[in-house]
Image (cartoon, rainbow, N blue to C red):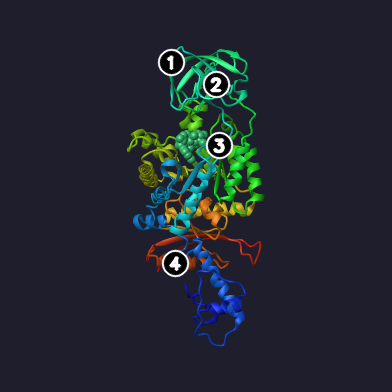
Amino acid sequence: MAVVGDLALMGTKIKLTDKFEKRVFGVPLSSSTRFSFSHVKNLDVRKLRTAVRAVMQVEKIQSSGELKEGSLGFDVVSERELKENGFLGLRKTKLVCTIGPACSSIDELEKLAIAGMNVARLNMCHNSREWHQDVIRKIKKLNQEKGYCVSVMIDTEGNQIQVDHGSSSSVKAEEDSIWYFTTEKFEGSRPFTIQANYEGFSEGVNSGDEIVIDGGMATFEVIEKVGNGLRCKCTDPGLLLPRAKLSFWRDGKLLGRDYDLPTLSTKDWSDIVFGISEDIDFIAVSFVKDAEPITHLRDYLSTTSSKAIKVLAKIESLESLRRLEEIVEASDGIMIARGDLGVEIPLEQIPSVQKDITYVCRQLNKPVIVASQLLESMVEYPTPTRAEVADVSEVVRQYADALMLSGESAIGSYGMKALSVLRTTSTRMEQSCREESRQTLLHQRKLGASLPDQIAEQICHCAVEMADNLGVDAIFVYTRHGKMASLLSRNRPNPPIFAFTNDNSTQMALNLQWGVTPLLTDLSDDMEGNVKKTVELIKAKGMIKKDDAILVVSDIIPISTARTIFQSIQVMTIT
Ligand SMILES: Nc1ncnc2c1ncn2[C@@H]1O[C@H](COP(=O)(O)OP(=O)(O)O)[C@@H](O)[C@H]1O
Ligand SMILES: C=C(OP(=O)(O)O)C(=O)O
Ligand SMILES: [K+]
Ligand SMILES: [Mg+2]
């Protein structure tokens, strides 16, 4: 490496020698950087030093992969999808993949990234810290070196009551067989004995109550309490998996149980500290009961992390449903964790509960992920069932922001195929939603209390209406913290939203937002200049052509004239 770019300030192309570097800069530059020096007349050392430092800064950013000059921070996958499918065909629904042993090699991770994974989820219930660290670093490496834009989410283990029969394979419970649920700790397995991981698991349980395992895999009736344990009879035979979950029922009604365990355990906190140090983008909190742990975690992050890590609350218990609105309001987004939800509430309630949660999230403008068993049969088989495809389609029709794979990608043999089923199914359903103009049915609650917030909301609402009515090709938004981009996304426009931001954490957070393609670029106070520059760059890439129409929304608060906020809508036709 020899040339230090074109130093505009000097008005002449220069190269610097190694000797010169030591004399002028006094500090050694990177060992891989060699300078040679020529063609400079009337050298002004001070100007030169400033200019070279500026160039070096650009080089540093380029080599860290954050901002490739002239590349607009476009990730390679969106760029390819855009070139192949055009603006309207750009997928809107985001895809989250759980990373497990089946996809943790760099090659497998790259295949998932190419196939459209927007967010990689690491479930901290499983595997070691070192394993997770290795995966996170591989993803960062792929982003930096190969131009992908995959965000990283950790999902906490949480305090969950589980039962285990001690053997590594599943065990059959026969009708009328008698079983003992105990909190006694022992190694290995004992016949007809199931260990519970929490002393207080049987508190408030009476004889005659029912224990339902894993949402209906098997059912037991409590015969009597023996100390902390329960002697039970199997009334509905079935399979007991290792690490099964259980719920208690009385007179056909679920017993809501508050175990008085903190939502974030000591292990969860240490996983969070680990996550911050690994520069993750999202934390999904398991078994949230109310808004308190979410608020607490967000406060903690705001004081300890330099980057804006987003906190998602997982809705997977009866308690969380009872306090849904306060939890949604307190968090940066929601995951509908249908796996555990199906253990805690009757299965037939899941579809309507999913619809209600998705609706509340739309109202409060928080991204929502629908998770678990979307394509469960694909853990084993290379094609999904028709019912699974219908389930995925319904999620897309409800305008959820993201779909999530669990075992399908973590341990299944067909993770890539499963991801491609999600991609094609969502693209197809998005198209029919556009044809039906279903988004006009979305009713939006007014959110903002302050005038600027209300203006932003109205601007985005009108902008989307205009964009759809005019049939523009794309919406461009310039945003520092992602708020305008999310307000546009909330209205589910037909054209894609390109969100230009100068903040890497905003870019990574917007990866979960429906219809938004986040792009990292530098933004100046000069809005005209920003628009001109980004349009030129996109044009140079062949992504927009003559006569394409773009709707531009901006809210930039110029640093120089603090307090003045420019919020505007412009429609421009490419000439
Ligand atoms: N990091 C991991 N290491 C090993 N196995 C994993 C990992 N993550 C997920 N899995 C496997 O994938 C399955 C599905 O993942 P997930 O739905 O996240 O977990 P769970 O089944 O515990 O709710 C898990 O049951 C587990 O067998
Ligand atoms: C996503 C879920 O959580 P986990 O996989 O951590 O149990 C779920 O329960 O659906
Ligand atoms: K978890
Ligand atoms: Mg769960």
Name the quadrant containing residue 413. top left
Q: Is residue 419 something that shows in the picture?
A: yes
Circle 4 residue: 537
Farthest front residue in view: 187
Amino acid type indicated by mark 2: Phe
Whether the residue carrying mark 3 lies under 8 Å from ligand 3 is answered with yes
Q: Mark 4 to mark 2: distance in Å?
A: 60 Å
Secondary structure state at the residue bearing disc 3: loop
Secondary structure under the numbered disc 2 in the rendered image:
strand
Q: CA distance from mark 1 to mark 4?
A: 68 Å
Q: Are marks 1 and 2 in contact (CB under 8 Å)?
A: no
Q: Is mark 4 within 8 Å of ligand 1?
A: no
For marks 1 and 3, the one nearer the N-term is 3
The percent position of residue 487, horizontal first and vertical second, equals: 53, 51
Q: CA distance from mark 4 to mark 3?
A: 44 Å
Disc 1 from disc 2: Cα separation: 20 Å
Residue, far bottom: 42
Q: Residues within 10 Å of mark 2 (few under 14, many from 20)?
A: many
Mark 1 or 2, which is nearer the eye?
A: 1
Which numbered disc, 4 or 2, marks the residue that appears first in the sequence?
2
Identify the residue position indicated by label 3 in the image.
157
Q: Which residue type does callout 4 highlight? A: Leu
Can residue 354 be seen here? The reply is no
Helix, strand or loop status at disc 4: helix
Residue under label 2, please give it.
248
Q: Residue 80 at x, y = what percent?
A: 37, 57
> Quick one: 117 or 572, which is closer to the camera?
117
Q: Are marks 4 and 2 in contact (CB under 8 Å)?
A: no
Which of discs 3 and 2 lies nearer the camera? The answer is: 3
What residue would you read off at disc 1?
A: 174
